[in-house]
Image (cartoon, rainbow, N blue to C red):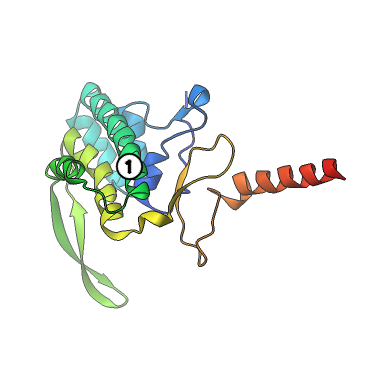
Amino acid sequence: MSDPEALFLGGHPALDFLNTKYGPAEQAKEVIGDGASFLRWLVRAGLLDSHAIAPMKRRLSERSLDLAAAEARKLRDWTAQWITRWCDRPKGDYGAELRRLNGLLERAHSYREAIGTTEGVRIVVREHLLTADELVAAAGLPLAVLVAEEDPQLIKRCAGPDCTLWFLDKTKAHRRLFCSATGCGNRAKVAAFRERQREH
């Protein structure tokens, strides 16, 4: 059985992580169902190099990968609750949340690499993932970037009925309402058109 489709509509890796479970509660689709699907999502999200999957599967047992996926799902649910509170009260006291987040980030091992670009040489941070714990830390790192660098007023939930997706509103006027113009946005337009037709 194939994984549910991973949706990358959030405009930020942390929100794409929140969107790994989507849809109405009774029909929710789970993208991170097991360890193998967690690895695939990390690659698609750009948080894990595709060449690392095979060595990771050889190094770690299926059970340890499944446990990492289960922890990632718990992290996702906790993150959704925190982000909801943070968007409502940006100036709140989030010391406990930051301590938990920092505890997660301590698991990660990274190194800096000098790479050549068209503009010259720059330093990039590379994740050195060896353990299942580090896989979960890789999923948590974008959350730290989100709360440190983004405006909570621009983090939104889709206005579409039954849509649970998050997104970062990067539009100029910051009036974006839907996760995608072709999906929920188009459905809203069709529904509004039909309502106008009924009224006439």
Q: How many marks?
A: 1
Residue 151 located left or right of residue 190 = left
Find numbered disc 1 in the image and state the secondary structure of the residue it sits on: helix
The disc labelled 1 sits on which kind of residue?
A: Leu
* Between 120 and 105, the one nearer to me in the picture: 105
Asked if 32 appears above or below 94 in the picture, the reply is above
Q: Quadrant of residue 38?
A: top left
Q: In the rendering, at what x and y percent does residue 84 appear?
A: 37, 42
Above or below, 120 against 24 in this view is below
Q: Which residue is mark 1?
A: 42
Residue drawn at point x = 36 percent, y = 54 percent: 152
Image position, residue 16 (x, y; %): 40, 45
Image quadrant where residue 54 sits = top left
Badge 1 local density, few (<14 within 10 Å), some, or many (20+)?
many
Residue beneath the point at 21% across and 31% down: 58
Tell me: residue 34, above or below residue 180: above
* Residue 119 seen from this side: yes
Residue 30 place in picture, x, y as percent: 43, 29
Residue occupying image coordinates x 51% and y 22%: 26
Q: Quadrant of the C terminus?
A: top right
Q: Is 134 left, or right, of 176 in this rendering?
A: left
Name the residue rendered at 17%, 45% in the picture. Answer: 95
The answer to whether residue 45 shows anywhere in this view is no
Residue closer to the observer: 140 or 113: 140
Residue with the most extreme right position: 200
